[in-house]
Amino acid sequence: MATRWLRTILALTFPLFALFVSAGSAHADLDGDLDALVSQIVSNDDQQGQLARELRQINSQLADLENQMVEHNKRVADHSRRVREHNANQPACRSTSDSPCAEWLAEAQALNDERDQLRAEGQQIATENDRARGQGQGIVDQLAQLKQERERLETERTRLQISKVFLVGTLAQARQKVPQDWGAPSVVDSGVGVRWVDPHNPDGNSIRINRATPESSSTAQHVDHVRIIAGDNVIGIGGKKLPNDRGAEASVPLSDWTTWHSWDRP
């Protein structure tokens, strides 16, 4: 008698134990995915912070180069003025060896040397300015990519958090029909939902439960719904075998599916 009661208790307890194990495993997978996403978001923020600091340094450098160019242009203007004055005071000499002409020519050569130096300085400032602007634009592009990636990570984190909440309410209903040996569910790659796969036929048998999508054009998806693949067939509403899962009939309302005789048969 005691043995029979023990067997009865174990028989009643095992499905609950399997449910808790599946829930725990699924939650652990979700928590691991969420932790990984948080780490990626933190890393993304760190990269953005570092790039923002580099961009501020480059902007400061560009401002300094702009000031250098302003001062350079002042020196160029002053040089041009002195060249005009020098040319206006050219002496009348019979020979370049005459003292006034020799002095004038020496001054002209000095002005030419100064002109060449000013041109080189101006070119150097322009080159550094172009290089800094190129670096700045590269950082701006990287920041744009990082911000876009962060938005994607935040969207994915939100989806997983919603999936975690959805999983709690779904497991209790789904475990009534999911075969016991199918183990824990995994989170779907897109949307919000969970998926079981037959370990003995992973490419042929699967159950996917999706959260309601009221914005969908298919009214069958306005409630929590199930996508069932059994062998080569998609099993739709009423147990109908379908060629693919693209039609509205492929979305079996979760409330209907839980009344079926088995996971793939009403």
Image (cartoon, helix red, strand yellow):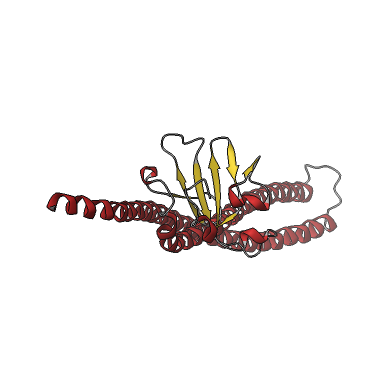
264 or 222: nearer the eye? 264
Residue located at (53% from left, 50% from top):
266
- In the rendered image, residue 156, in percent from the top left (x then y), is placed at 51, 56
Residue located at (42% from left, 34% from top):
200
Q: Is residue 57 left or right of residue 172?
A: right
- In the rendered image, residue 3, in percent from the top left (x then y), is placed at 14, 49
Q: Is residue 117 left or right of residue 265?
A: right
- In the rendered image, residue 235, in percent from the top left (x then y), is placed at 58, 45
Write down the quadrant of residue 171 in the picture: bottom left
88 or 195: nearer the eye? 195
Residue 155 visible, this orientation: no
Residue furthest to the front: 1
Write down the quadrant of residue 252 in the picture: bottom right
Position of residue 205 relative to residue 239, above or below, is: above
97 or 111: nearer the eye? 111
Residue furthest to the left: 2
Residue 23 visible, this orientation: yes
Position of residue 65 relative to residue 188, above or below, is: below
Q: Is residue 62 left or right of residue 28?
A: right
How many numbered discs sit on the rendered protein? 0
Residue located at (68% from left, 49% from top):
247
145 or 131: nearer the eye? 145
